[in-house]
Image (cartoon, rainbow, N blue to C red):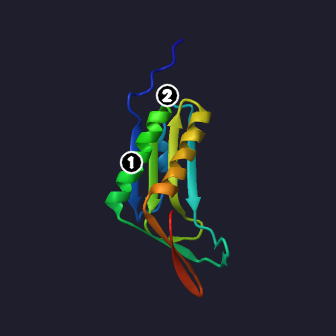
Amino acid sequence: MESPQPPERARCRVRVSARPIDPRALVSEVSGPPSGAIALFLGTVRDHSPGRLGITHLEYEAYETHVVARIEEIVEEATARWPLNGVVVEHRVGRVELTEASVAVAVACAHRAEAFEAARYLIDELKSRAPIWKKEVWPDGEAWSAGS
């Protein structure tokens, strides 16, 4: 029995938005019969960072058109490296509360190893290359830092 041929081009979507991220919707969007594995990464807001405790929330800023284009480049690189059936990358802008997702990557492939590798590549490259600015806020102050 032959396995079904993957699509010639993976279904891909990138969004930078103030809207909350819905993990179930992302999984549903990348799901499909050729995919035996879906890797979902969620980056969530925590209450601390190196040298700082008591963070209450984060605020993200980005020049959305430029950021989307940069993330789309990273997605294209991933689809050239791995046999992906679907990819969704979302990043929040604006205020993001503790425990909420600020970034998400969902990847669908035929096999788990490729899904894990591609998802890791996507989030690592996004954090390294996408021009997104993060402000940490705590009761006595706030500070901006580069990176998501």
Quadrant of the frame with the N terminus: top right
| Tally of numbered tags | 2
Q: Which of 67 and 84 is in front in this view?
A: 67
| Mark 1 neighbour density, 10 Å: few (under 14) some (14–19) many (20 or more) | some
Q: Residue at x 62, y 34 (%)?
A: 113
Q: Work out whether 24 lies above or below 19.
A: above
| Mark 2 neighbour density, 10 Å: few (under 14) some (14–19) many (20 or more) | some
Q: Residue at x 40, y 42 (%)?
A: 12
Please state the horizontal and vertical placement of residue 32, each as a whole percent of the image: 47, 33
Secondary element under disc 2, as helix, strand or loop, is: loop
Please state the horizontal and vertical placement of residue 122, each as a whole percent of the image: 51, 47
Query: Label for residue 34?
Result: 2
Query: Label for residue 57?
Result: none
Farthest left residue? 65
Farthest top residue? 1
* In front: label 1 or label 2: 1
Residue 55 in view of the camera: yes
Q: Which residue is drawn at 44% across and 34% down?
A: 80
Q: Mark 2 belongs to which amino acid?
A: Pro
Residue 29 in view of the camera: no
Q: How far apart are marks 1 and 2 (CA)?
A: 23 Å
Viewed as shown, does residue 32 lie left or right of 36? left
Q: Which mark is first along the chain, 2 or 1? A: 2
Q: Which of 123 and 100 is in front in this view?
A: 123
Farthest bottom residue? 140
Q: Mark 1 belongs to which amino acid?
A: Glu
Whether the residues at callouts 1 and 2 have beta carbons within 8 Å, the answer is: no
Please state the horizontal and vertical placement of residue 120, each as a whole percent of the image: 57, 46
Secondary element under disc 1, as helix, strand or loop, is: helix
Return the residue at label 1. Answer: 72
Viewed as shown, does residue 7 lie left or right of 121? left
Please state the horizontal and vertical placement of residue 17, each as a whole percent of the image: 39, 62
